[in-house]
Image: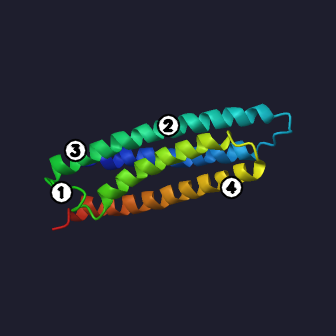
Amino acid sequence: MKFIHPIFMLFVLSYLFKIHHLGKQALAVNPKSPDADQRGVFLAEHKKVSKIAAILFAIGLVGGIFGVVQFLQVNTIFMKTYGHGFVGAILLGLMLANIFVGNSIKTLVKEKSRDNLRRFHFSLFYFTLACSAYSLISGLVVLFKGPMS
């Protein structure tokens, strides 16, 4: 039972790569080409998968808290998990911030402003990946070494 959260979250992390891939595909479509309508399709899928991933992150965070308390008997989950619990909450916040920023890109009129916000969106995404890597490492430590004493 203690492996449900890690396996579920690895599945959810795969969504990050799918989101990134869809975003890159959308940016690769030239707006002046005959295939310009594909950009909208990629962006719609990008948005849909992002929302699904955020919901799954929220479920994973709650499931992780339950799992640590139930199976590892740790009541101070955020303090005894090498920062894993904090990073999980931060990841959920980053996912929500990415959704908000991504939706804001299309509302800007000036191209330079849109490009700046798009770069910020990518930076948030890469920060999300970095936090995910730490979450993965700290989660493995908690899983195999146990909580901090």
Q: Between marks 2 and 1, how big is the CA–CA gap?
A: 30 Å
Residue for badge 4: 116
In front: label 4 or label 2: 4
In which image quadrant can residue 90 be found? bottom left
Up the image or down, 146 lies above or below 93; here it is below
Q: Dot 1, crowdedness within 10 Å: few (<14), some or many (≥20)?
A: few
Coordinates of residue 144 in the picture (x, y in percent): 25, 62
Image quadrant in which the N terminus is located: top left
Q: Are marks 3 and 4 in contact (CB under 8 Å)?
A: no
Determine if residue 14 is in view. Answer: no
Q: Are marks 2 and 1 in contact (CB under 8 Å)?
A: no
Q: Choose the circle earlier in sequence order: 1 or 4.
A: 1
Residue for badge 2: 51
Q: Between marks 3 and 1, how big is the CA–CA gap?
A: 12 Å
Determine if residue 135 is in view. Answer: yes
Coordinates of residue 148 in the picture (x, y in percent): 20, 66
Mark 2 secondary-structure assignment: helix
Up the image or down, 148 lies above or below 45; here it is below
Coordinates of residue 132 in the picture (x, y in percent): 43, 57
Mark 1 secondary-structure assignment: loop
In front: label 3 or label 4: 4
Q: Amino acid at mark 3?
A: Phe
Coordinates of residue 112 in the picture (x, y in percent): 75, 53
Q: Choose the circle earlier in sequence order: 2 or 1.
A: 2
Q: Dot 4, crowdedness within 10 Å: few (<14), some or many (≥20)?
A: few
Disc marking residue 76: 1
